[in-house]
Amino acid sequence: MFTLYIADLLAPYENENGVTINFRDPNYSADDGGYHPVEIRLENDGDGWRFCYITDFCYVGSSYMAELAKDLDFDFDAGVFQNLFGTYPIEQALEMFQIWETNFVFYAMVSKVFTIQALTD
């Protein structure tokens, strides 16, 4: 479901070299919580789209001291997975990715909590 959803979002950009898609919950804040912002980068290899990275952000800290930081980062180009605890080979993130993917699909497709913006290059 995830790849079909992303493919639908990419349809208008088939002639572009790359697309970065940002998913934002307009109500997400450090104090009130909400759905984490997500950024997905894909590049067009001519034969199809390739995922470069998927990054899930969260606020670290509270109130005016809060900063948006990477919570989960699946960097397919570099072959690494990062979270707040460290950096690991991407192969070790399979279970984490499956959990993230299931949640993301529900939030994006069923709950429709995100505003979506695509940037091309």
Image: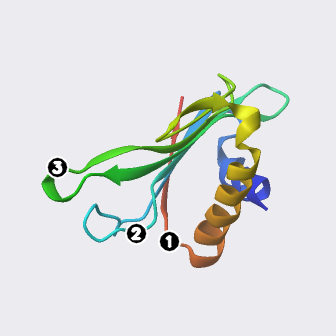
Residue 19 in the image: x percent, y percent?
59, 37
Seen at 29% across and 71% down, the residue is: 32
Task: Name the one closer to the observer, 47 or 34.
Answer: 34
Work out which residue is located at the far front of the displayed protein and give it: 85
Structure colour scheme: rainbow
Q: Is residue 41 visible?
A: no
User: Which sits earlier in the primary sequence, circle 3 or circle 2?
Assistant: 2
Task: Name the one closer to the observer, 34 or 90.
Answer: 90
Check disc 2 and give the amino acid type.
Answer: Gly
Seen at 74% across and 55% down, the residue is: 98
Q: Is residue 12 visible?
A: yes
Residue 78 in the image: x percent, y percent?
65, 22
**Secondary structure at numbered mark 2:** loop
User: What residue would you read off at disc 3?
Assistant: 65
Residue 113 image label: 1
Task: Name the one closer to the observer, 16 or 98.
Answer: 98
Give yes or no for contact between labels 2 and 1 (Cβ–Cβ under 8 Å): yes
Give the Cα distance between marks 2 and 1. Answer: 9 Å
Check disc 3 and give the amino acid type.
Answer: Met
Give the Cα distance between marks 1 and 3. Answer: 25 Å
**Secondary structure at numbered mark 3:** helix
Task: Name the one closer to the observer, 119 or 56.
Answer: 56
User: Which sits earlier in the primary sequence, circle 1 or circle 3?
Assistant: 3
In this rendering, the answer to whether 1 lies above or below 52 is: below
Check disc 1 and give the amino acid type.
Answer: Val
Residue 30 in the image: x percent, y percent?
28, 61
Quarter of the figure with the N terminus: bottom right
Seen at 45% across and 54% down, the residue is: 37
**Secondary structure at numbered mark 1:** loop
